Amino acid sequence: MASLTINGGRILNGEVICQGSKNSALPILAACYLIKGKCEIHNCPRLSDIDATINILRSLGCDVVFLNNTVTVDSTKAFGYEIPEELMHEMRSSIIFLGAVLGRNGRAVISTPGGCEIGLRPIDLHISAMKKFGVIINEEHGVLDCKCEGGLKGTAVTLSFPSVGATENIILAAATAEGTTTILNAAREPEVTDLADFLNACGAKIHCSAGAITITGVKELRGASHSVIPDRIVCATYLCAAAVTRGEVTVKDIVPAHLGGVLPVFEEMGCDIKLLHRQIKLTAPVRLKRIDKISTQPYPGFPTDLQALFTTLACVANGTSVIVENIFECRFKHVPELIKMGACIKTEGRVAVVEGVPRLCGANVNSPDLRGSCALIIAGLSAKGTTTVNKLYHLDRGYAEFEKNLNDLGADVYRTEEDDAKKSEQQTNS
């Protein structure tokens, strides 16, 4: 199991190019199964979650090639409707295949998904929505056997919560369903719009407006080329790295509008933000100011995926910050690890109160999940001494060439594989 060692205290400066969005690429790749033809998906980052998605596509009978950040998927001869349990358990977002497989075959056999343990992410919204299309679902021992005789029929779905995954699954199922489907209280994230744009390029009829999506089903979709949008969470991560190290970093190939709920928080903390064409430049103050209050919300609000990173920024800010996690109830697992590094944080339920300290100290910490791993790495960049972040496989699910990019900006970080770590430990003990 890999770990990352960070020698802290270096100021980050320079430019970095943002990778393509993982949360956009995954549903788009799943959508390729709907299309009886060849698709080229550009700007796909090399991630373990992308590899897992490709493995699922191959298990369903697709021909897939991943080369130079372009995934070519040929689903012409695909025939499968059953996804092996071990592939479903590799990531949470594997549930997105439900709508695509049902849309193509009228049947899907899947198990409940895996992924980061950040709290309940029930698939009830997905299941109830599929039933509205006329799908009959039998569940036994964690396996869902979904059937729809006569094909999916357009329907009206009102989501009790604007779930991104459920919205995407409904879009996938509706794209080739008979009739018209409407989604009320739909998720508004840029990744949802990106999926709709790709499907429309393939011949779908999808119209997105604020909180509502209308899909008119078509008989068949054709292959197309599409470039995945930049990853707004990864962009914000590099900005956090600059902010916590008192640096100046420009992130390129990004859509600034996608970070509308985040940039004001950087400014509240004393950072200077300059927006250029597809670029964001952050210049940090000598010491960050406290955050009055952050409350995570669905887009366009403050994203839950950045809560852990801004908790880290608050740890070294001047004053007391309040952070409220409204999306997931178990997304403070990074807090005990930050406390090991000298952070002063108290949590109660979904609220964290952070009293800023002048500086954190290096420590040996364990990554609890994808975004938590980034929070600990960001903490290590600003800490006095050396920090080792273990269980790095979480990071590899969402960040491509992360340590290389940090080093190019002036950081001192390096990866150690498990065998190397054991060898070093044995040499020390002897």
Image (cartoon, rainbow, N blue to C red):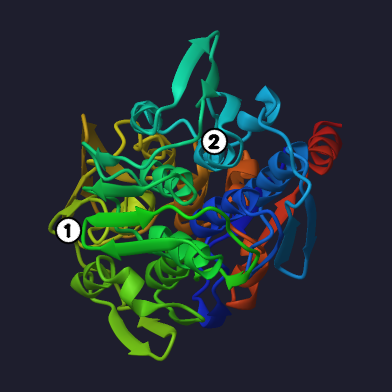
Give the number of the disc on residue 374.
none
Q: Nearer the viewer, mark 2 or mark 1?
A: 2
Residue 276 coordinates in the image, percent (x, y): 38, 91
The total number of labels drawn is 2
Whether residue 366 is visible, yes or no, is: no
At numbered mark 2, what does the secondary structure look like: helix, strand or loop?
A: helix
Of the image marks 2 and 1, the number of the one nearer the N terminus:
2
| Horizontal side of residue 8 vs 269, given as left or right | right
Residue 282 coordinates in the image, percent (x, y): 37, 81
Q: Nearer the viewer, residue 262 or 332?
A: 262
If the image is split into quadrants, where does the C terminus sit? top right
Q: Amino acid at mark 2?
A: Leu
Task: Provide the residue designation for mark 1.
Answer: 319
Residue 412 coordinates in the image, percent (x, y): 63, 66
Give the number of the disc on residue 102.
2
Q: Residues within 10 Å of mark 1 (few under 14, many from 20)?
A: some
Q: Image height check: is 261 above or below 31?
A: below
Q: Residue at x 23, y 69 (%)?
A: 269
